[in-house]
Image (cartoon, helix red, strand yellow):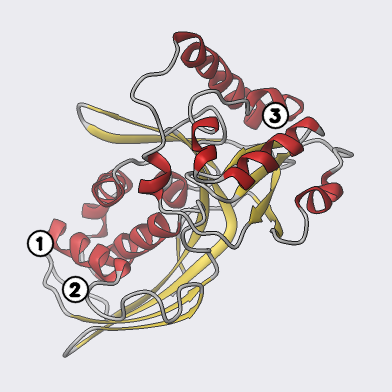
Amino acid sequence: MRLIADRTAVRVPATSANLGPGFDAFGLALALHDVVEVRAVTGASSVHVQGEGAGEVPDGEDHLVIRAIRAGLEYVGAPQAGLELRCTNAIPHGRGLGSSAAAVVAGLVAARALVSEPEALDDTSILGLATDFEGHPDNAAPALLGAATIAWIDHEGPRAVRLPVLEAISATVLVPQLRLSTSKARSTLPGHVPHRDAAANAGRSGLLTLALTQRPDLLLAATEDRLHQAYRASVMPESIALVERLRERGHAAVVSGAGPSVLVLHGVEGDGRDEIGAIAGPTWRSSRLAVGRGVEITG
């Protein structure tokens, strides 16, 4: 395997995992992006970041995008090189919007663009490598494939399918100042849950597939969760309280991924979406976003 290009550029979307009942399985790409420009160089690697994460993330080999590029090149047996990254980031860090999955997918797709046999890093391979980084594929899958995805792991490794989301569906993302690590959020979850709660979530997950693809009027019912959100209240009480207020007003609100951001799904005209910011209040940054496409090579 050879390196046949010395530069590329990748655009990768934010993602929201779980979508309420689809814990560790469902994900949604959002039209909010990081753009990564990669150049192979002689000498040491360097990273220049504008936007989210500037001045906070590593600026050398420890940067997550560089680590992912290295993993991709190693996977296909391609030679390594010094790397210069220029990152223009719009995805908030530590807010449950898939910033780490975006970085990993961006790096792996950049590696695919640099090598002589890109088919050796196909989507299945990239999903598997991304899951090695992330621990689960629920954010990596929509970052890679776009739209909504359902991901799972079987004896062959991580797998995902893409759902044809209705064009009418969009989202509002409410981002607080608070940051929260995924590991801290997951530490609140119990080892066992009541059978009735697991059964309820299984039914709502099936309904969510229908709501996203055919029946957006069912989004409120389809996003009800009993499996994980309430348990996270001890580490994100404001997020859980906001989800409850929004749902009481008829909005299909959920915790975005591990939180603390809140995602509201829309699909029906006249659903009162203009009042969401008022319900949240001024301490939440509100953004209206379309459903996003998967990662793209742009240069």
- Circle 3 packing at 10 Å, graded few (<14), some (14-19), many (20+), is many
Badge 2 amino acid: Leu
Badge 3 amino acid: Leu
Name the residue that disc number 3 marks. Answer: 219
Badge 1 amino acid: Gly
In the image, which is nearer the foreground, mark 1 or mark 2? 1
| Coordinates of residue 79 in the picture (x, y in percent) | 11, 72
Residue in the image at 64% along x and 30% along y: 213
Residue 209 located left or right of residue 221: left
Residue in the image at 57% along x and 26% along y: 225
- Can residue 278 be seen? yes
Asked if disc 3 and disc 1 are in contact, CB closer than 8 Å, the reply is no
Name the residue that disc number 2 marks. Answer: 3
| Coordinates of residue 126 in the picture (x, y in percent) | 29, 50
| Coordinates of residue 106 in the picture (x, y in percent) | 38, 63
Disc assigned to residue 27: none
Could you tell me how far apart the alpha carbons at marks 2 and 3 are, in whole angstroms?
46 Å
49 or 73: nearer the viewer: 49
